Amino acid sequence: MRRIGLLVPSSNTTVEPEFYRALPRDVTLHTARLFLTRIAPESILKMVEDMETQARLLASADVDVIVLGATAPSFLKGLGYDRELIQKIEAATGRTATTTSTALVQALQHLGVKRVALGSAYDDKVNGIAKAFLEASGLDVVNVKGLSLVDNLVVGRLGPESSYELALKVNCAEADAIVLSCTNWQTMDAIERIERETGKPVVSTAQASIWAALRIIGHTDPVTGYGRLLRDLARASVTQAA
């Protein structure tokens, strides 16, 4: 039995259920919460103040990996900030760690994607930060649309139809893939439908986090029902990419 530790924004009601549904039966999920109610830069920065303490609590459950399962906190300060957070978690716990933003970039690289259309639950300010992070990571963001939401509980109450509809709106001919960003936004149940209708891979932040965690613990059996990325686990390296 392998164990995944997940650091969750306190108001996030989506990422845990999406992890539970996709994880293999021999992998268990264990969570700790970091206080966040609003998706705004000042709230996001404050959220990570308690990160190391909560990570140590997860490590005491003998987890094999710790994932900071929140997108905006791990890209907020630009390129390299996600790596800084990983180093802090690993130093505090002695466990391998990753972040949602790290996983997202690695997943897009794994798929050979260069140009992305970015759909999110965020407002324009946070979308701008997300776009800058992806572009600094070597990707070309060719279109961006958000739902302009700040209240994280409101985001969690949206159904997967909202991510499906926004994905179709943000998709454009120039994009190689569609990115859906915000782990509190229901995306997993929409991914297969979007991929069928657009003919493009879809990478959501929850899906990428699951993918990264599974490959770190060495799980390579395909996970079906949630898009090309998780079906391709057998082709992914079992070690964390640089």
Image (cartoon, rainbow, N blue to C red):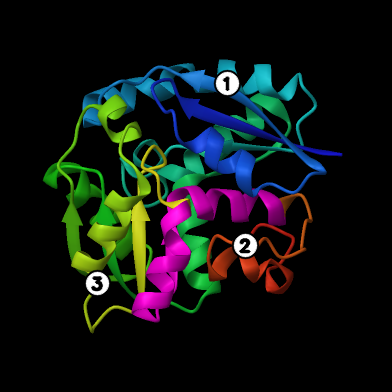
Task: Give the number of the disc on residue 32.
Answer: 1
- Please provide the residue range marked out in magenta: 189-215
Asked if the residue at tag 1 contacts the one at tag 2, i.e. Cβ–Cβ closer than 8 Å, the answer is no
Residue at 31 percent of width and 59 percent of height:
164
Neighbours of disc 1 within 10 Å: few (<14), some (14-19), many (20+): some
Mark before the other along the chain sequence, 2 or 1: 1
Q: Quadrant of residue 139?
A: bottom left
Q: Name the amino acid type tagged 1.
A: Ala
Horizontal side of 170 relative to 8 (left or right) equals left
Horizontal side of 157 relative to 82 (left or right) equals left
Neighbours of disc 2 within 10 Å: few (<14), some (14-19), many (20+): some
| Residue sitting nearer the eye, 155 or 142 | 155
Residue at 69 percent of width and 26 percent of height:
93
Mark before the other along the chain sequence, 3 or 2: 3
Q: Name the amino acid type tagged 3.
A: Asn
Determine if residue 169 is in view.
yes
On the image, numbered disc 2 is attached to which residue?
A: 241
Q: Name the amino acid type tagged 2.
A: Ala
Task: Give the number of the disc on residue 171.
Answer: 3
Mark before the other along the chain sequence, 1 or 3: 1
User: CA–CA distance between discs 2 and 1?
Assistant: 25 Å
SS of the residue under disc 2: loop
User: CA–CA distance between discs 1 and 3?
Assistant: 35 Å
Residue at 23 percent of width and 48 percent of height:
129
| Residue sitting nearer the eye, 111 or 97 | 111
| Residue sitting nearer the eye, 198 or 114 | 198
Which residue, as the protein is rendered here, is positioned at the far right? 1
